[in-house]
Structures are given as C-alpha cells and as structure tokens.
Image (cartoon, rainbow, N blue to C red):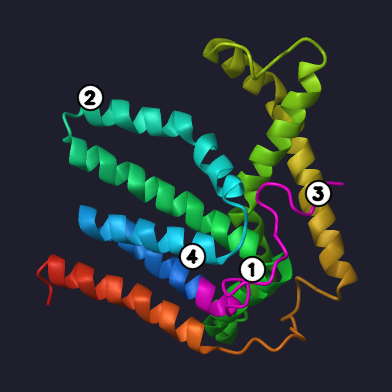
Amino acid sequence: MYSRNSFGSFYPVDSMIHKLNPVVKIINFVIMIILLILCDSLAINVFLLLLILIMMLLSFVPLRYYMDTFWSMRYLYIIIAFLCLYFDQTLEVCFMYMIKLICLVEYISLLAYTTSPSESAYGIEKFLSFFNFVKFPISKLSFKINSLLRYNPLKINVENKTFKIVSSRGFDYYYSNIISRFFLHIRVRGRVRKLIKRKNKEIAFCQELRLFNINKYRTNYRTNKVSFYDIFLMLFHLCLIYAYLVNGGFI
C-alpha cells in the first residue's frame, strides 16, 4: 500500500487551499488552461506562475513535493529548449513555453495535494452536471477524469519505487548514464503500468466502500460552501482573463 503522503497523493493538512470549494478549484483550473493555450504574453504567464507559487505556499504542503514534480520534468524542458533552437525561436518564446509547462504541471500537483479523491470526483461531477439532461454517465466520467489528473504523479511515484527496487538487483538507475536510463525505462514500463492499474483499482474499491457508485449520481455528505476565499481566488483568475483580452486588443 502506498503512503498517503507520497508524491501526487492528497496531503491532509489544514490550509486555506484545502478548504476551497472543489467546484471552484475545477473552474479555476479550466480558466488557467484557457490562459495557457491562448495567451502569448510573457508578463501574464509570469504573473500566473507567481499566483501558483503563492497558492503552493498557502497550501502548507512541503515545497519539496512540488520540487519533485518540477525535477521530474527536466528532460522535457531540455526537449523544449532544443525545439525552440531548431525552429529559430527567441529566448523569450522558449522561456514562455517552459513557464506554461511548469504552470500546468504544478497546478495539477496543487489540485492533487489539496483535494481528496472523493472531493475531486464531486467537483468534476458538479462541473459537468449540465450534461444531466442527456443522461450522460457523469459519475463514471468524473472518476475517469479524476484518475487521469492523478495519473502522471502516480506514475512517477510508482517508477521511483520500482527503480529503487531494481537498483538492489544491479540496475542502478540513479547513477547510470542517460542511455542506460532509457533502456531501463523500457524494461520496467510494463511492470509500472500494471502497478498503476492495480493502484487505480484500489482507489475504485475504496470509493465503493464509501458508497460511491460510478453508475449513479453521487451524494456528497460534506457541505461544500463557497467562501470569500473561493470568490476572491476566482476573481483573480478572471482578472487574468481580462488582462489577456486587453493585451490582445479584444477590449
């Protein structure tokens, strides 16, 4: 059984970010995705990164957890830098793409650390509730989306545990060159995939024990009120949308 405080898992502490309404968190995440896709302003992207950093500090989750997420994507940053050089992009554009990637990964990690799996499923269900009129299987879809959002942190966590195990058998991942690491990734990916699938089954079983049925619209017994901090944070995200519209000349 994996630790409850492992990389990418819900970190149970009492913080303002933990207390935010899960539906508002999903809405803010969608706003952030829209900004990352559409906005080409370096200033707005840097401001978004600073906002995420402030939320990380307010979450009271140890920063080393977020740094693990950052470090796990180091090879992707190198690939982005090479692609920018290949297509003759400026240093500013390269830097902006890296900021977009960091914002996306760290925001997902922030959601994973500060929102329990049941609250995540609740927020996704409420967000997609407008599909109720077409009898869409919202509960099943929310569970799938919730699992997808937690897949990459869970994958890295399982990979780290697997590499530590195989290191005792002569395949030392952490002190080998990049070519050896690549072939070791290929050798263990099947096992890692099976372990992740098993972990997702454990999560689904725990949800069943909590009377969660993916074939029915679920009931949340915790009162999820929208507080002042929810409204304030959402307005902050909307202000970034307004800044993008003004910067792009749409307003």
Mark 4 = which residue? 55
- Residue 135's quadrant in the figure? bottom right
In the rendered image, residue 93, in percent from the top left (x then y), is placed at: 21, 42
What distance separates the C-alpha of mark 4 from that of mark 1? 24 Å
- Residue 12's quadrant in the figure? bottom right
Mark 3 = which residue? 3
Q: Earlier in the sequence, mark 2 or mark 1?
A: 2
* Residue drawn at x 21%, y 67% as measured from the top left: 244
Residue range of the region highlighted in magenta in the rendering: 1-25
What distance separates the C-alpha of mark 2 from that of mark 4? 35 Å
Instruction: Look at discs 4 and 1 and give the one toward the viewer.
Output: 4
Give the quadrant of the C terminus: bottom left
Q: Amino acid at mark 1?
A: Ser
Q: Residue 142 bears which disc, if any?
A: 1
Marks 2 & 1, CB-CB < 8 Å contact: no
The one of 160 and 206 positioned closer to us in this rendering: 160
Q: Residue 86 bears which disc, if any?
A: 2
What distance separates the C-alpha of mark 3 from that of mark 4? 24 Å
